[in-house]
Image (spheres, rainbow, N blue to C red):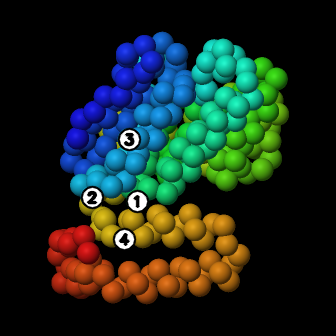
Amino acid sequence: MRAKVSSAVDQPALLMRQSGGVVTLTLNRPAQFNSLSQSLLTALETALDAIAADESARVIVIAGAGKAFCAGHDLKEMRANPAKEFQQSLFEQCSRMMMRLTEIPQPVIARVHGIATAAGCQLVAMCDLAVASESARFAVSGINVGLFCSTPSVGLARNVGRKQAMEMLLTGDFIDARSALEHGLVNRVVPDDQLDAEVKKLTDAIVSKSPVAVKSGKQMFYRQLELGLAEAYELATEVIACDMMTEDAHEGIDAFIEKRPPEWRGQ
């Protein structure tokens, strides 16, 4: 799978490549620190929909070209379109794309370098997993320009503690990668020159697992988060009982008992 989606100035806003079941989506507006313009959000939505339907795609990596991961929304584009209708449509589109990350069957990993600010920090939070370089920095900095980062706060508050989230939202201050790890915003922090290798460790681990179990597990995980304790256990019980009926579960258990590698059937 190879694709380019062009922006309004006929530059590739998003790059997509697939290798060994791993699809890498690279935000490609380096001069704008990969800010999320309308065209880039549209490209991401289109790509995610296509990947969701592709059974050969097992895991997604979202990366950024140039010096940054993502600097949030394109403020110049927002100021050039002052009507509330435009602003409402833009944030609805962004929220829809962010939610899509949790809805698609494949796990999504953020590969973070440079800065991840405002909606860029939100993007990190909404990915299933995140690996950051030691030099990466994170902020929800809308407050610095007179905007509380309302939409980024949704993803942020579901990943880090409330006190940490509110401090970031109210001050707009940057936190470093180690603090992001301590707060639960990212999974791993590595030296800059080891970022790709660390991401590959995660993608290799996921690709080696049953695609059926990964798909059903991701879906169940996000559904149960919104339920009460009893309802969450009811859902989890139903899902794991159904998973036990799959060929992959039978194969996996047999392989464990027989001390051999499993051969996943995807059923």
* Circle 4: element type: helix
Q: Earlier in the sequence, mark 4 or mark 3?
A: 3
Kind of residue at disc 1: Pro
Q: Identify the residue position indicated by label 4 in the image.
A: 213
| Marks 3 and 2 close (CB-CB < 8 Å) | no
Task: Indicate the position of residue 110 as horizontal and vertical percent values.
Answer: 46, 41
How far separated are the C-alphas under marks 4 and 2?
14 Å
The disc label shown at residue 55, or none: 2
Near mark 2 (Cα within 10 A), the count class, few <14, some 14-19 or many ≥20, is few
Kind of residue at disc 3: Ala
How far separated are the C-alphas under marks 1 and 2?
9 Å
Q: Earlier in the sequence, mark 3 or mark 1?
A: 3
Which callout, 3 or 1, points to the residue nearer the camera?
Answer: 3
Residue nearer the viewer, 69 or 231: 231
| Quadrant including the C terminus | bottom left
How far separated are the C-alphas under marks 4 and 3?
23 Å
Which callout, 4 or 2, points to the residue nearer the camera?
Answer: 2
Residue plotted at (17% across, 75% down): 260
Which callout, 4 or 3, points to the residue nearer the camera?
Answer: 3
Kind of residue at disc 4: Ala
Q: Identify the residue position indicated by label 1 in the image.
A: 105
Q: Identify the residue position indicated by label 3 in the image.
A: 47
Q: Earlier in the sequence, mark 4 or mark 2?
A: 2
